[in-house]
Image: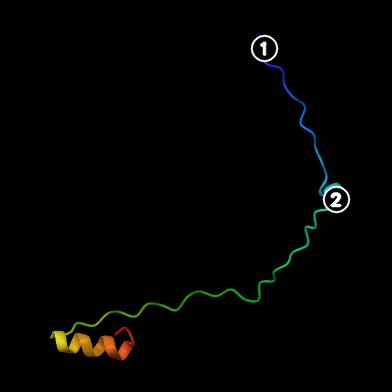
Amino acid sequence: MKAKKKKIESIKPEVLGVDFTPRMEVLSVSEPPKRVGGAKVESVEELVAKLKEAGVL
């Protein structure tokens, strides 16, 4: 027995009342800033001070 194929009905968006006009506008595209290399710290106190300076703590 062979399977029967159903016909696929093609409907245009205008018939369904769908609006395809773009709603967003791209203003600009740019790359993110380059990453800066890290710095080594000598002690825990210096690490905490740098973290506080960066606003992490």
State which quadrant residue 49 falls in: bottom left
Task: Measure the C-alpha gap from mark 2 to mark 1.
Answer: 36 Å
Three-letter residue code for mark 2: Glu
Q: Is residue 7 left or right of residue 26?
A: right
Task: Say few, some or many: other residues with alpha carbon within 10 Å of mark 1 (under 14 / 14 to 19 / 20 or more).
Answer: few
Q: Is residue 44 left or right of residue 49?
A: left
In the rendered image, the residue lying farthest to the left is: 43
- Residue name at image x 80 percent, y 34 percent: 9
State whether residue 38 is above or below residue 2: below
Determine which residue is flagged by label 1: 2
Marking on residue 14: 2
State which quadrant residue 7 falls in: top right
In the rendered image, the residue lying farthest to the right is: 15
Q: State the image coordinates of residue 47 (x, y, percent, origin top left).
A: 20, 85
State whether residue 54 is above or below residue 21: below
Rendered-image quadrant of the C terminus: bottom left
Q: State the image coordinates of residue 22 (x, y, percent, origin top left).
A: 74, 64
Q: Earlier in the sequence, mark 2 or mark 1?
A: 1
- Residue name at image x 19 percent, y 82 percent: 40
Q: How is the image coloured?
A: rainbow
55, 38: nearer the viewer: 55
State whether residue 9 is above or below residue 42: above
Q: State the image coordinates of residue 39 (x, y, percent, origin top left).
A: 24, 83
For the image, the number of numbered tags is 2
Q: Is residue 44 left or right of residue 38?
A: left
- Residue name at image x 21 percent, y 86 percent: 48
Marking on residue 22: none
Three-letter residue code for mark 1: Lys
Q: Considering the numbered disc 2 on the image, is that residue within a helix, a strand or a loop?
A: helix
- The reply to whether the C-beta atoms of the residues labelled 2 and 1 are less than 8 Å apart is no
Task: Say few, some or many: other residues with alpha carbon within 10 Å of mark 2 (under 14 / 14 to 19 / 20 or more).
Answer: few
- Residue name at image x 45 percent, y 79 percent: 33
